Amino acid sequence: MHFQDLKLHAALLDAVRAEGYETPTPIQEQAIPLVLTGKDLMGCAKTGTGKTAAFALPILDTLLRVPVPTGRRNPRVLVLTPTRELAAQVADNFARYGGRTRLRTTVIFGGVSQHAQEIAIRGGCDILVATPGRLLDLCGQRLLSLASIEIFVLDEADRMLDMGFINDIRKVVAMLPPARQNLMFSATFADEIKTLAGSILKAPEFVAADPPATTVELITQQLCFVERAQKIDLLLHFLKDPDMRRVLAFTRTKHGADKVVRQLQRVGIKALAIHGNKSQNARTHAMDEFRKGGTRVMVATDIAARGIDIDDITHVVIMDLPNEPDIFVHRIGRTGRAGEAGIAIAFCAEDERPLLADIERLIGKHVPRMEDYPYVSPIAPPAPTNLTPHKRTSPSVANKPSGRPGNSPYGHQGRPGGPGRADNHSRSDNAPRRSQGHDQNRGKRPPQNAPRPANSGR
């Protein structure tokens, strides 16, 4: 199938061709015709499958079926997203696909002054992309009305619930006209997602591009057992490989992310951090530099696990295994996007073994163990008997360092805000804190301070 087979508006087909796309992804092929019929939809698709275009293109087509008003207009479409980064990227997708039309897209989110957003709202728009906190603030100040909404999209619904937005979602839905089309997308379809879908969707169609919470087949996964204090040294070793052109590294804490960036910059590697303590301007700047290639390494906490939509990330390095196993899937999904191959390397310290066990139960297989790398933990377990050890294909670095390095700058005594740390610098982005605005900080779950027993567009 080609995009022209979907009978989209000519302006949208021109925009798709300009982006270099010819054939729709499975989620797009399934979802676009259903959305065009006006039916409610529940879409379950893993990251990197072209989900945004799966709803943006048919929504734009639907709006173009009636003449675009010439004067000020209230938004007809509301897309609710969990994070600022995702909101900005969804709005950018709408703007690019609708760039050959007169449709207007506005994005609002917290963490920045609302003045510019007020001006944009007064100017009128057709599509509004928002995070929950700022949206409710502006509606509460009577600066924004949702009375004209015809299509409501709840994006990353599972992430919304993880971040504690369920009450905000209910408040937003209560302000919407009852006669509307509802579209809901999630990477998983757990019971709580089914409950939420039942309260919003009416006789929905269900589409799933891939089984929920599975890893991307094009991603080569590799696991290194390393002492916590030597993780930064192992990262520096891998970065000697020129094939690691654009690297996204994940740490558990904001303090740990900043320390990694300082160490990389100290040896001349261009790196920036993105996490909840960064201002929105700083985060936008970091994203722009990373996207343009001005920064080789982006170090992020899980605020970016689903918020970075860049097709050519060559490597993901998971320096700290996440407390929730499904976050592992979303982290590695930042590479291997748009049909491209990618490599994900995970570091595992001794106290992270239970977290690794949870991850492997979730994905239904062992993460392949890398061979022949420095700083191997002296108590690294043997490879599982039911798994052939994975030969390293990348990175391949000559002049392997030897010997034990000195004190690592990675975290306090080599432990970047490990379990139980309560100081502000080491707090996880998922830890609760006093409100400093909205959206990112609203009602988040605290991290689990000990490993849990075994129990997941284009």
Image (cartoon, grey):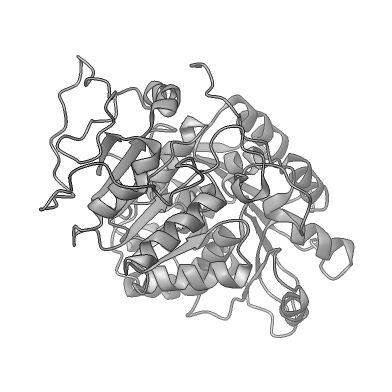
Quick one: 76 or 349, which is closer to the camera? Answer: 349
Give the quadrant of the C terminus: bottom left
Quick one: 375 or 34, which is closer to the camera? Answer: 375
Q: Residue furthest left?
A: 398
Could you tell me how many numbered marks the image carries?
A: 0
Which residue is pictured at 50% across the width and 50% down the height?
A: 256
Q: Is residue 372 left or right of residue 196?
A: left
- Residue 291: x and y, percent? 39, 69
Q: Is residue 318 left or right of residue 388?
A: right
Q: Is residue 175 visible?
A: yes
Q: Quadrant of residue 347?
A: top left
Q: Is residue 380 left or right of residue 56?
A: left
Q: Is residue 208 visible?
A: no
Quick one: 111 or 6, which is closer to the camera? Answer: 111
Q: Is residue 222 above or below residue 195?
A: below
Q: Is residue 429 above or below residue 268?
A: above
- Residue 29: x and y, percent? 38, 49
Q: Is residue 199 left or right of residue 245?
A: right
- Residue 175: x and y, percent? 83, 53
Q: Residue furthest bottom?
A: 70
Quick one: 20 or 166, which is closer to the camera? Answer: 166
- Residue 120: x and y, percent? 71, 79
Which residue is pictured at 48% across the width and 42% down the height?
A: 413
Q: Is residue 7 above or below residue 122?
A: above
Q: Residue furthest front?
A: 406
